[in-house]
Amino acid sequence: MNYACYSCGAGSDLRPYGPHGAMTCFKCAMATPERRAEAERNFVQQLDACGASAVVDGTVTGPYPLEHAAPHVRAAIDRTAQASKESAMSPPGAAAQGGKTP
Ligand SMILES: [Zn+2]
């Protein structure tokens, strides 16, 4: 499906953060303080509607619930979470400190 910015008609870099979720391009979304506030408000509203875990994948989709993510996206998220957990268990510098002799 082809989308266009509700304001200027541009067809790229669109997100559903315009009035009532209409597609808007970044330039139009940031054009005035009022539009920027509306875009931010709509983003947060969509993010909140996703529940405990949301995915923001950089596409025209906007935030969506983790359980609706494609398998390859979920696998990437799981790998990132695992790597984060492992680095939390051994913070940088821990090995160097442990290796020192008093
Ligand atoms: Zn636009």
Image (cartoon, rainbow, N blue to C red):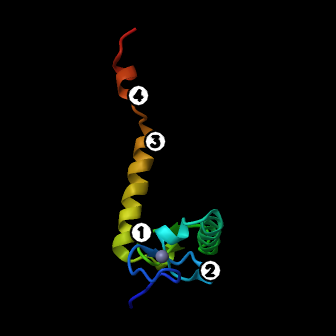
Residue 33 percent coordinates (x, y)? 63, 62
Residue identifier under label 4:
94
From the top left corner, tell me how far across and down residue 54 is, in percent: 53, 69
Q: 77 or 1, which lies in front?
A: 1
Marks 3 and 2, how far apart at CA:
41 Å
Question: Label 2 near label 1: C-beta < 8 Å?
Answer: no
Residue 58 image label: 1
N-terminal label among 3 and 1: 1
Q: Which of pointers 3 and 2 indicates the residue nearer the eye?
A: 2
| CA gap, disc 3 and disc 1 | 27 Å
Q: Name the residue under label 3.
A: 88
In the picture of the structure, the residue carrying the numbered disc 2 is: 19
Image coordinates for residue 25, horizontal then vertical, percent: 47, 74
Circle 2 crowding by C-alpha within 10 Å: few under 14, some 14–19, many from 20: few
User: Helix or strand or loop: what does disc 4 sit on?
Assistant: helix
* Residue found 43% across the figure and 86% down from its top: 3
Work out how far the residue at label 3 is from the one at label 4, CA to CA, in angstroms. 11 Å
In front: mark 1 or mark 2?
2
Q: Is mark 3 on a helix, strand or loop?
A: helix
Residue 92 or 100: which is nearer the viewer? 92
Dot 4 or dot 2, earlier in sequence: 2
Of the two numbered discs 3 and 4 on the same chain, state the one appearing first in sequence: 3
Q: Quadrant of the C terminus?
A: top left
Residue kind at label 4, given as amino acid type: Ala
**Residue in view at x 36 percent, y 11 percent:** 101
Q: Quadrant location of residue 45?
A: bottom right
Mark 3 and mark 1 in contact? Answer it, CB < 8 Å.
Answer: no
Q: Residues within 10 Å of mark 3 (few under 14, many from 20)?
A: few
Q: Is mark 2 within 8 Å of ligand 1?
A: no
- The amino acid type of the residue labelled 3 equals Ala
Name the secondary structure under disc 2.
helix
